[in-house]
Amino acid sequence: LKKGKPMSILIEKNHRVVTIRLNRPKARNALNTQLLSELVSVLQELDQSPEVGCFIITGSDTVFSAGADIKEMRSKSYHQMVQEDYFSKWEQFTTLRTPKIAAICGPALGGGCELALMCDIIFAAENALMGLPEITLGVIPGIGGTQRLTKAVGKAKAMDMILTGKHLSAFEAEKAGLVSRVCPTEQLLDEAITAASVIAGYGKFATTSAKEAVDQAQEMSLKDGILFERRIFHALFATEDQKEGMSAFIEKRSPQFRGY
Ligand code: HXC
């Protein structure tokens, strides 16, 4: 990380759960290049650690993220965008293996919504708003929104949101299958930490394998996906956590997973 510059993210470790808080309040947590590179480098380092079992990505109580930084992008030319391959670094966020929960209070718009869509689970506070308003700026979603939103909620809702720029409330997002839980705003982070601690308490080999298998459902045919799942399931019998989990059940005790 660059020395001397204020961090645009805050990092907190709570046993095996790492919470990353987006921290550019004056810009409503807009995702500029500095924030992206801090986020990715911190997460990539922690991703390797057997001590870290789950990430939470969150903003403040009033805003998750207003999306890509419009002030940073406004004057860029087509050539600059191509040359820099603007936003391609976000791919590194999607290749993290540790499960990630997005905990959203307030607006998650444009790139903010796309960041949530790149997480594995989304929890929304009652004050959350999700949308892809890029069309109102003369562009389209550029961090996977047209693809991931469509896979998450289907063509009808995705087209409506992307072409009209209409936002969904937390309850609408839950009904559409975009978020898995809606909580009172003041309880959101506790709820996310509780769920993340449950995930982090399991063997990391098993959780990362489960995530990988579910992710493949977006990429593979049903037949190939089921074969992929079965092979990973077989492979888990090479882990000590499988022996421990099954022995603990039979011996009526709590398992002590070690992540291998
Ligand atoms: C840069 C932003 C910003 C953004 C807000 N700000 N959103 N700066 N990029 N995405 C700045 C404002 O210019 C303002 O700066 C300050 O943050 C406060 O913003 P307000 O609008 O006054 O705040 P508020 O009333 O609380 O409303 C919050 C908000 C609204 C609902 C999130 O700011 C908003 O709608 N923002 C834009 C949302 C959007 O269109 N997102 C899509 C971005 S494009 P000053 O200097 O005046 O204090 C995107 C593209 C991805 O994500 C790929 C396509 C290429």
Image: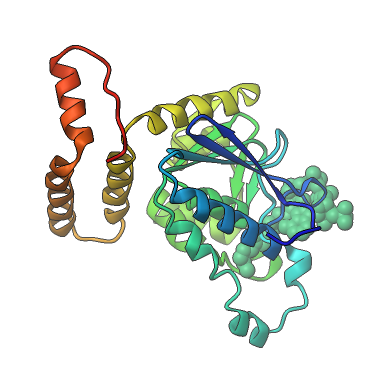
On screen, 206 above or below 247? below
- Using residue 159 as the reference point, say whether residue 108 is left or right of it: right
- Which percent across, then down, holds residue 18? 54, 38
Front one among 51 and 5 = 51
- Give the quarter of the figure containing the C terminus: top left
Viewer can see residue 28: yes
Relative placement, left or right, of 234 versus 155 is left
Q: Residue at x 62, y 80 (%)?
A: 84
Query: Residue 76 versus residue 140: which sits nearer the camera?
Result: 76
In this view, the residue farthest toward the bottom is: 79
Above or below, 1 against 101 in this view is below
Residue 134 in view: no
Give 177 or 10, whichever is nearer the viewer.
10
Q: Quadrant of residue 155?
A: bottom left
Identify the residue shown where x is 66% and y is 43%: 64
| Quarter of the image where ligand 1 sits | bottom right
Coloring basis for residues: rainbow
At 56% from the left edge and 67% from the top edge, which residue is drawn?
A: 142
Residue, far top: 252
Q: Quadrant of residue 239?
A: top left
Residue 169 position, x and y percent, is 59, 37
Where residue 37 sits in the image (x, y, percent)?
63, 62
Rendered-image quadrant of the N terminus: bottom right
**Residue for point 19% across, 19% down:** 248
Residue 184, percent from left and from top: 60, 22
**Label total for image:** 0
